[in-house]
Image (tube, rainbow, N blue to C red):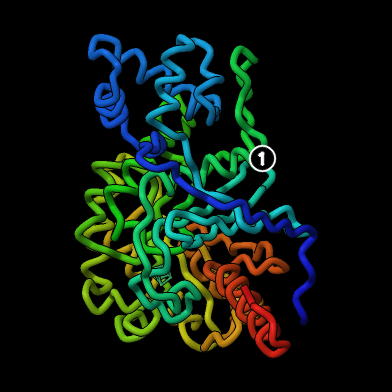
Amino acid sequence: MSPKAPITQDVMTIPRKLPEGKVNLVGLTRDQLRAALIDHGTPEKQAKMRTGQIWQWIYQWGKRDFAEMTNLAKAYRAQLAEHFVIEIPEVVTRQVSEDGTRKYLCRIAGGHEVEVVYIPEDDRGTLCISSQVGCTLTCSFCHTGTQKLVRNLTAAEIVGQVMMARDDLDEWPTPGAPKDETRLLSNIVLMGMGEPLYNFENVRDAMKIAMDPEGISLSRRRITLSTSGVVPEIARTAEEIGCLLAISFHATTDETRDVLVPINKRWNIEELLGVLASYPNVSNSERITFEYVMLDGVNDSDDDAHRLIDHIKRHKIPAKINLIPFNEWPGAPYKRSSNNRIRAFANIIYQAGYASPIRKTRGEDIMAACGQLKSATERARKSRKQIAAEAGLDGS
Ligand code: SF4
């Protein structure tokens, strides 16, 4: 079936330049923000209060212009504007699917691009954000795995994705207006491009900002970090972030997992399960999500389903298993399991007493599988260049 055209696609190409010498306040922890203010002339005695005020303007009210920070003296606002900026990633393309899924390609410093996907559901709205440009890991079913790691995102670029989406959803509250508890963007999943635990400090700082009660104020239970299984960093995630955890599990034997999720060669299934068993107690969180992409004839047998249950039971891990119909991308080496196969697999898990939701495929018309929009945009650019070259024109 040929992909349907997206409902809308906007292309924005506003150049992104950080004015020389200015410091971006986005992504700084409260302590870093305070230190930056003192460094640039805020008297130490006032710094704590100013930090709180500026923090609220940025993260609670979504303001980007110091001139709008009306509880600060005019001269002080001018002083801030001289030294600082409030900068978030710039949206390059934005696509809205028939089902309401929104997919953004965002440009960050250095001209790199990352993907962000917003998925609205009846009772929640989830934003899937990226933590790296490309990825060092090479999970064979994953499209991002075909793109080399370029660099880690900064904390500003990570929390900036959330701010960008709130802009697009027009969801910043107005100072003084009654608090609205129904949120369009209610959940964050770190499931976009990259392995978040290979960019731990920036991910932690960004999520701490997203959780801060005087700002974006998302509960830690509404943030899920998805890892391919960087075992030494998992306990740290519980202690220093405290969010929910999802594991890209995808296979029930080391032999298969070594191929699908090659980090398994470093930390195998038993080591991974061992560290997961203690996660919920440390972070006081709920169940761990086991993500399991359904690949035809590779990992989808009844035996696989039984083995999966056995692994989880043996280690007494409170778990739910998220079954993901494979979102085929051009050149992918796998096929999606049939619906019947997925249902039979889900049933075995369900009968064993575990939740086994089958993820709805969302945004297929806009290629919402991780890494696909970036590649398609690059291909489109390349072909524009080729066409121009053939016609003897400048392709830029
Ligand atoms: S699944 Fe995650 S960790 Fe694996 S290659 Fe893709 S982005 Fe990287």
Ligand 1: image quarter: bottom left
Look at the picture and state if 139 lies above or below 58. below
Q: Which residue is mark 1?
A: 169
Q: Of 269 and 186, which appears nearest the observer? A: 186
Q: Residue at x 45, y 75 (%)?
A: 305
- Name the quadrant of the C terminus: bottom right
* Amino acid type of the residue tagged 1 in the rendering: Leu
Q: Residue at x 23, y 58 (%)?
A: 275
Q: Of 306 and 234, which appears nearest the observer? A: 234
Mark 1 and ligand 1: say if the CB distance to the nearest ligand atom is below 8 Å.
no
Element marked by disc 1: helix
Whether residue 353 can be seen here: no
Position of residue 354 in the picture relative to residue 34 (left or right): right
**Callout 1 crowding tier (Cα within 10 Å): few <14, some 14–19, many ≥20:** few
Position of residue 396 in the picture relative to residue 37 (left or right): right
- Name the quadrant of the N terminus: bottom right
Residue 170 percent coordinates (x, y): 67, 35
Q: Residue at x 58, y 59 (%)?
A: 105
Look at the picture and state if 364 lies above or below 155. below
Whether residue 152 can be seen here: yes
Residue 318 percent coordinates (x, y): 37, 53
Residue 241 placement: quadrant: top left
